[in-house]
Image: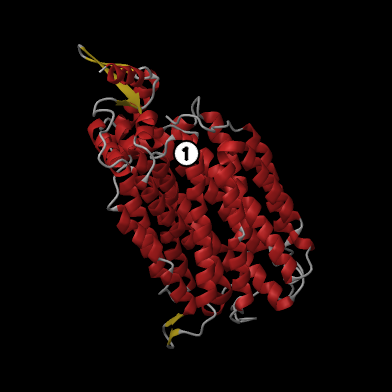
Amino acid sequence: MMIEEGQQAEEQSHLIPRHHGNDNQYAVTYEEAISKTGYGKFHYLVLALCGWAVSSDAIEVLSISFVLPAAQCDLHLTSNDKGWLNSIMFVGMMLGGYGWGSLADHFGRRQVLLGSLTVNGLGALSSSFCQSFWIFLLMRLVSGIGVGGSIPVIFSYFTEFQPKEKRGTMISVLATFWMFGNIIAAGLAWIIVPLDIGYSSPNFTYNSWRIFIAICTFPSLSSAALFFLMPESPKFLLSVGKEEQAAAVLKKIYDINNPNALMPYDVESIVLSSDSKTDSHYRSNATKNIKGTCGSKSVTKLLDSTIELFRAPLRRSTIILLIVTFTISFGYYGLWMWFPELFSRVEKYGGSPCDSVKGSNVTESGDQNCTIPDTWTYQSGFLTALSNLPGNLFTIFLMDKIGRKGILVIGMLGSGVTVFFIPLIHNKVQNLLLSCTFGLISTLAWNALDVLQAELFPTGVRSTAMGVSSAANRIGAILGNLAFGELVDIHCSVPMIMVAVLLVLGGLTSLKLPNTTKTDIH
C-alpha cells in the first residue's frame, strides 16, 4: 500500500491543479498525455500512412517533369509551355495550401486530408486523357489544388501525434517519404515512358507517358481511402474543447501501443499547456473558429487565423519563415523540375546544359527535335532522386543533435554553392554527379524546414501557418519555373546564378529563426 501511495504521489508531483466548481482535480498536459501512450504500433501505422500520402504528393508534383521531354511531341510544347506546365501545379498548390490548411484548423485534419487527396488523384487521372495543351494544363491545376491541401495538413496531423522527445526525428523520417515518392516517380518514368505502348487514332492518343500519369494517381487515391480508417488528431479535438473525443483517441492509441494495460489518466484530466493562460487562449480561439464556419463567417475566420500569424509573438518567425521558404522553393524547384529536360538536352547535344541549348528549342509548332528521349534521361533522373537518401539519413539521426536551424543553414548555403558550378561542367557524367550533389545537400535544408515550420506555431494556427508557408513555397516554385522557361534558351547560366544567389540568401536569413529542438509545442 505504501509503495502504491508513493508511486501515486510521484505521478502527481508534476501534474497541474485544475478546478471544476468545488472540485479540485489534477490534469496532465497534452505533451505528457501523448508521451504516456508510449511509442509503438499506432505511431508506426500513422508514419506509414502519412508517409504514403507524402510520397503520393511528391509523385504528383515531380511526375510532370519526367513527362515533358516526351509530351512535347503530342502537345507541341515550346520551352515557355514547359515552364507553365511545371508551374501550374504550384499555382494550384498555392491556392489549395492556404484554403485547405485554414479549413483544417476549423474542421479537423482528417476531413481535409480525405478531400484534398481525392481532388489530387482525380484531377491528375483526368489530365492523362486530355488531348490539348490548355485542357491538360487546367487538369494539372486541379490536381495541384489537391496536393496543396494535403502537404501541410499531413505534417500537422503527423506532428500532433508525436511526443516532443521523438518529434524532430520522426518528422525527419516522414520528410524522407518525399524522396521515396521522387524515386518511385523516376523509376516508373524510366520503366514506362520510353516504351512504345498504348492506343493511337487520328482523334485520340493514349500512349506511354499518359499511362505513366494515370499510374501515378494510385498513391493519392489509395491514401484517401486509408484515411477513412484513421482517427482525428486528439490535439485538434482538445483545442476545440472536445475533451472526451480527444481522450477517446488517446485511449485508443494507448490500447494499441500497450495491450492489456490501463490508461494512466481520465477523460477530464488533459490540458493543452501547463500555462493556464496559453491553454485557455488557444482553446478559446479554436472554439470560436469552429462556430459559424459557413458562408461569409467562414471566410472571416480563415482571415482571422492568418492575421494572428502576423501579430506578436508570432510575427517575426512568420516573416522570416516566409522569406526562407520562398528562396529555397525558387532555387530548388526552379532547377529540380528542369533536370529531366536538361539531361535530355545534354544527351542530344553533349557538353553542359548551357552549351546544349543552341538549336534545341522547340518551335512554335513544337515539331523541331520531336523525339522520345532515350533511357539515359530517365536513368539520370532516377539516380538524382536516389541521391536524396544520404541527406535523409543524415537528418533522421542528427536532427535532434545538431538542431533544425543549423542543418537548414548548412543545406541552403551548400546547395547554393553547388549550383554555381553547373554551367562549368563538360559532359553528361559531370552533369549527373553535380545534380546528385545538389539533391543530397538540398534535402538537408528541406527536412530541417519541415520540422521547423511544424514546431514554430501553436495548434490553433498550425495548419494555417503551414498553408501560408506553402503559399510562399508555391510562389517561389512558380517564379523559378517560369524564369527557367523564359531564360533557359537564352543562356542557362542566367537562371542558374539566380537560383544560387537566392539559396545563399535564404541560408543567411534562416540564421534569424529560433531553434525549436526538444521544446514543447502548444
Q: Point out residue 128 in the picture as x, y percentages from the top left corner.
A: 42, 72
Tell which residue pokes out farthest to the bottom in this image.
Answer: 202
Residue at 30% x, 39% y is: 254
Tell which residue pokes out farthest to the top in this image.
Answer: 22
Q: Is residue 112 above or below residue 63?
A: above
Which three-letter amino acid code belongs to the residue tagged 1? Arg
Q: Is residue 455 above or below residue 328?
A: above
Label 1: which residue? Answer: 167
Quarter containing the C terminus: top left
Tell me which colouring the rendered structure shows. Answer: secondary structure
Residue at 47% x, 49% y is: 174
Label 1 crowd bin: few (<14), some (14–19), many (20+), radius 10 Å: many
Q: Within the image, what quadrant is residue 33 found in?
A: top left
Q: Point out residue 298 in the picture as x, y percentages from the top left corner.
A: 32, 39
Secondary structure found at label 1: helix
Question: Does residue 88 appear anywhere in the picture?
Answer: no
Quarter containing the N terminus: top left
